[in-house]
Image (cartoon, rainbow, N blue to C red):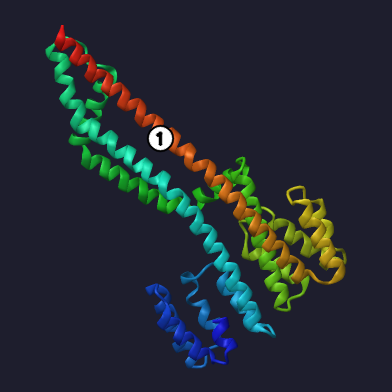
Amino acid sequence: MALMLGSGMTLPQATRLLGEGAENQQIRRSFDRINRLVADGTDFPKALEGEAQAFSPLFVPLVEVSYASRNPVVILNSLSTFLRRQDNLRSEVGAALVYPAILLVGAAFMVIFLAIYLAPNLAPMFSSMGQEVPALIAAMVRFGELLAGYWFVFALLTGVLVGTLFLIWPRVSSRLRRFAFRMPKVGTVMATLSLARLSRTSALLLGSGLPLAVALRRTAELMPREPAGDSFTKAAQQLEGGGTASDIFVADSRLPQSFKEMFRYGETTNTLPLVLASVAASFESRAERQMQSLTRLIVPLVTLVVGGAVAAIVYLVMGAVLSVNDLGTL
C-alpha cells in the first residue's frame, strides 16, 4: 500500500490492486469489500474497521493513525517493515520446531506400532514357554488392546479436548505467556521481543504526529499483554502531570539500562521517534540472535530426549526378543 500510494495511486486503485494480488482468500475478500466502501466514499479507516479480524491486531489502528498523519506513506513503510520482521521471526521459530515435531510424531507412531502389532506377537512366545511376560511387553499389549477396542473413545476424548482447548485458549494462552516470561532463556527472548514491539509501536505513533503522552498511552492500549505496557501508561500519566516520562522507565527494574538511557536521551533532545525506532531495531536484532541460540539448544535437546526414549523402548523390546531366542536354544 505504501508503494502504491507513494507512486500516486488513489486509495480505490490501491485497495483494488491489493485485493487482486492477495494470495490469501480471506484477505482478498476483505480488500474487495474495503475497495467497494472506499469507492462509494467511505473513509478508509472506517472501511478498514469492519475487516479488522482479517489483519494483524496492530495493523488497523496503526493504519488509521498513519491515514490521519501528514505523511501516511512514511508511516506505512515503517509499519510494513515492522510487520514483516515480526512475520520473519515467527517463521524462523516455526521452521526450527518442525524437526522436533516430526520426531515426536514419529515416536508416537512407533509406540502405537509396537503396541498393536509387535507386542501381541511376542507375548504368546513367553506364555508357551512357561515364562512370565516382561512388564514392558505386557503393558504394550494392554495399551494395544485399549486402542483397538476403544479407539472411538480415544477419538471422542481427543475431539473434546481439542474443542475445550479452543474455547478456553485465550485464558490458557495468557497463563502460558506469563509462565514463558519466567522461564530462563525463553523469558529473555520474549522480554526482548516485547520491548521491541512497544518501542516500534511508540515510534510509529510519534512519527504520525501524536503527542508523546498520547502515543505512550495508545501503545499500552494497543499491546495490553506486554508486561512493560503498564510503565508506558504510567509514563503518559507522568507527562500529563507535568513530569518526564523517562523517570518512570528508569524506576522500572524490568527494563534494560540501554532502553532507559536511550529514552532519556531522546526525550531530552526531542528526537524520540528516531531514537525509539533505533532501539526497536536493536532489540529486534538481539531477539533474533537470542532466538537462533535458543533453537540451536532446543532442537538437539528434544532430539536427545525423544531419541533416548525410543532407544530405551527398542532396547527393552529387543532384549525380550533375544531372551525368547535364548530360551528356545535351551
Quadrant in the picture for the N terminus: bottom right
Q: Quadrant of residue 238 in the image?
A: bottom right
Q: What is the three-letter code of the residue carrying label 1?
A: Val
Picture coordinates of residue 297 (x, y %)?
Answer: 54, 41
Residue 65 in sight in this render:
no
Picture coordinates of residue 260 (x, y %)?
Answer: 80, 56
Query: As rendered, which of 279 and 59 lies closer to the eye?
Result: 279
At horizontal 38% and vertical 30% (from top left) the residue drawn is 309
Q: Which residue is mark 1?
A: 306
Residue 113 in sight in this render:
yes
Callout 1 crowding tier (Cα within 10 Å): few <14, some 14–19, many ≥20: some
Picture coordinates of residue 313 (x, y %)?
Answer: 32, 26
Determine the secondary structure under disc 1.
helix
65 relative to 142 in the view: left or right: right
Question: Does residue 278 sit above or below 120 in this rendering?
Answer: below
Number of callouts in the render? 1
At horizontal 68% and vertical 62% (from top left) the residue drawn is 280
Query: As rendered, which of 268 and 142 lies closer to the eye?
Result: 268
Q: Quadrant of residue 228 in the image?
A: bottom right
